[in-house]
Image (cartoon, helix red, strand yellow):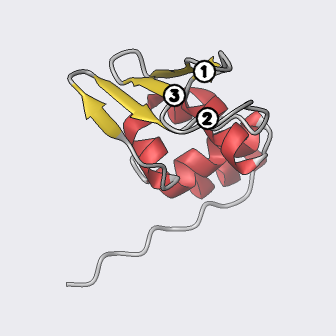
Amino acid sequence: MADVFGDARWHPILWVVSMLSFPIDRYNQLGVTCCPNPKHEGQPRMTCLIFPRKNRWRCTKCHAWGDPIDFVSLVLYRNKLESARWIIRNCRLLPEWERFEQEYRGLPAKKPVPASK
């Protein structure tokens, strides 16, 4: 089986956060956005720091932190495996996941459709 978590963590966190429609303010090498934690006390506006070089995020108020998979799992209320699959399918920086999943299960892989000219 392909490394789902490794592939999902490979996606840049700024790209993943923007795909979730979170507003991002940029300050030099930092990004700032709203906290994805549903248990955040107080106003979650612009309290979450995004570190693109480390591909991590951290909230300055509720101290929630993690990688892109953790961010997606908090926003979409999904477990980590489903969040990793969501990143791979919706952020589209890697090849289609279905083909690898079918190969793992022993099913014949769907042949890619050639691009129309």
Secondary element at image label 3? strand
Q: Which mark is residue 8?
A: none
Residue 78 position, x and y percent, is: 78, 45
Q: Residues within 10 Å of mark 3 (few under 14, many from 20)?
A: many
Image position of 32 with respect to 21: above or below? above
Horizontal arrangement in the rendering, residue 59 relative to residue 12 (left or right): right
The tag earlier along the polypeptide, 1 or 2, is 1
The tag earlier along the polypeptide, 3 or 2, is 3
**Three-letter amino acid code of the residue under disc 1:** Gly
Find residue 89 and report its image quarter. bottom right
The residue carrying mark 1 is 66
Q: CA distance from mark 3 to mark 2?
A: 11 Å
The residue carrying mark 3 is 48
Q: Residues within 10 Å of mark 1 (few under 14, many from 20)?
A: few
Q: CA distance from mark 3 to mark 1?
A: 11 Å
The residue carrying mark 2 is 71
Q: Residues within 10 Å of mark 2 (few under 14, many from 20)?
A: many
Residue 92 position, x and y percent, is: 43, 54
In this rendering, does residue 15 appear at all?
Answer: yes
Horizontal arrangement in the rendering, residue 38 relative to residue 33 (left or right): right
